[in-house]
Image (tube, rainbow, N blue to C red):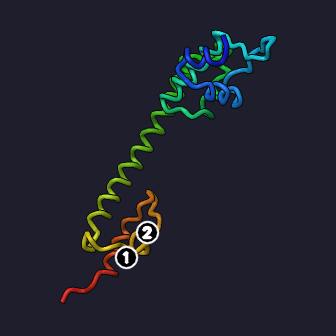
Amino acid sequence: MNISQLAKAVGVSTDTVRYYEKQGLISAPQRQANGYRRYTDTHVDLVRFVRGAQALGFSLAEIRAILPQVVQGTLGRTEIEQQLKAKMAQIDAHMAQLKTLKKELAATFSALRCAPHQPVAAAHATAPDSGSGAGVAVARRAFAKRQPQST
């Protein structure tokens, strides 16, 4: 099959197929007499595997690391379970970071003291990184210091 037939069979663009080939995710196909690439069912299976792994959140680097075992047929259940557990742990850690960031964003939103129609200067809108990227404690102090005193 040619590149457009492969792309259509797996639901990707021809550019994606070329990119996967360039990145070493799929092997370079044989060339026909006219110079066109000639893909096989193995290429279809590999592109489907790559796309499925990407859909599960695996990076191309992570996929590339296990592809030799996939191609050789030596990727066992134990290895798959380890990869999936590691990915779930990464997702859990990322979710925890996002929850912290959401809390800090909500606290920063609550700390805003200027009137809605007033512009906020860049110096008032940014804060040093507190670990999650929001810097809410410093932002609160900065907003509090810059607010006019009530009389």
Quarter occupied by the C terminus: bottom left
Quarter occupied by the N terminus: top right
Q: Quadrant of residue 51?
A: top right
Element type where label 1 sits in the image: helix
Mark 2 or 1, nearer chain start: 2
**What's under tag 2, amino acid-wise?**
Ala
Whole-percent x and y of residue 9?
55, 14
Q: Is disc 2 surrounded by few (<14), some (14 to 19) or many (20+) residues within 10 Å?
A: some
Task: Give how far apart the Cα atoms at labels 2 and 1 are.
Answer: 8 Å
Evaluate if marks 2 and 1 touch, with contact meaning CB atoms under 8 Å apart: yes
Residue 107 located left or right of residue 22:
left
Element type where label 2 sits in the image: loop
The residue that appears at 62% across and 18% down in the rendered structure is 4
The residue that appears at 38% across and 54% down in the rendered structure is 101
Q: Quadrant of residue 27?
A: top right
Residue 126 located left or right of residue 75:
left
Q: Is disc 1 surrounded by few (<14), some (14 to 19) or many (20+) residues within 10 Å?
A: some
Residue located farthest toward the bottom when viewing the structure as drawn: 151
The residue identified by callout 2 is 127
The residue that appears at 58% across and 24% down in the rendered structure is 50
Whole-percent x and y of residue 115?
25, 73
The residue identified by callout 1 is 142
Residue 95 located left or right of residue 4:
left
Pick the front one: 147 or 65: 147
Residue located farthest toward the front when viewing the structure as drawn: 34
